């Protein structure tokens, strides 16, 4: 079933109108299913699934192209990591399902106007990987961070990269 839901979860606060407008620039690639667009003050986002085998080169190329056309500047792209995430690699809140079951994860970041940052995360859950089977569905999540949240995300990425250099963790952030 292919459907699109738009959820307005909070009334826009100061600066919220900009975030809501920017959220509408988050692309949904052709062939996406189960699309949900959330327009919130905190982190406006879009989430969907795309049928594409690992490592999703078409989906990634479409995201990079669409974000560029929408005026976002590519700031960093990591490669897919296997056997990830580790609990220390994920923010403490959210991503519950992802924290426990993802086996391949990709991240791309873009800079926008006024200190806003857009992030796309793609992941495959591959519980049968040991038997040589990969999922053919990639989960896509894209969100927009306001200037304050973008600064917190940047500090989090810096901490993770320091742990990468020290050999304490394996993360997509290690590849930037």
Image (cartoon, helix red, strand yellow):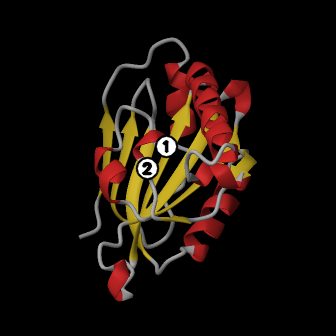
> For mark 1, what is the residue?
89
The image shows residue 174 at horizontal and vertical percentages of 66, 51
Q: Which residue does the image show at 31% across and 38% down from the upper left? A: 7
- Please state, as top left, top right, bottom left or bottom right, where the N terminus lies in the image: bottom left
Image quarter of residue 116: top right
Mark number for residue 29? none
Q: Is residue 93 above or below residue 110?
A: above
Give the residue furthest to the top. Answer: 14
Whole-angstrom CA distance, mark 2 to mark 1, is 5 Å
- The answer to whether residue 138 of the structure is visible from this angle is yes
In front of the other: 4 or 165: 165
Q: Which residue does the image show at 57% across and 36% down from the upper left? A: 22
Mark number for residue 86? 2
In front of the other: 132 or 40: 132
The image shows residue 101 at horizontal and vertical percentages of 32, 59
Q: How many labels were placed on the picture?
A: 2
Circles 2 and 1: CB atoms closer than 8 Å: yes
Q: Which residue does the image show at 30% across and 79% down from the upper left? A: 128
Tell me: 135 left or right of 56: left
Question: Is disc 2 placed on a helix, strand or loop?
Answer: loop
């Amino acid at each position: 079933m292919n459907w699109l839901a738009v959820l307005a979860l909070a009334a826009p606060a100061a600066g919220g109108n900009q975030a809501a407008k920017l959220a509408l620039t988050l692309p949904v690639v052709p062939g996406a299913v189960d699309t949900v667009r959330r327009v919130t003050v905190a982190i406006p986002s879009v989430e969907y699934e795309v049928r594409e085998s690992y490592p999703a080169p078409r989906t990634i190329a479409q995201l990079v192209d669409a974000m560029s056309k929408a005026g976002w500047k590519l700031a960093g792209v990591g490669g897919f990591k296997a056997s990830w995430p580790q609990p220390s690699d994920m923010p403490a809140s959210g991503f519950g399902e992802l924290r426990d079951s993802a086996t391949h994860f990709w991240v791309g970041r873009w800079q926008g106007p006024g200190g806003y940052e857009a992030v796309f995360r793609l992941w495959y859950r591959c519980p049968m990987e040991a038997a040589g089977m990969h999922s053919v569905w990639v989960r896509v999540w894209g969100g927009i961070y306001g200037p304050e949240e973008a600064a917190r995300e940047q500090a989090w990425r810096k901490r993770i990269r320091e742990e990468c250099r020290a050999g304490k963790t394996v993360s997509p952030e290690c590849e930037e």
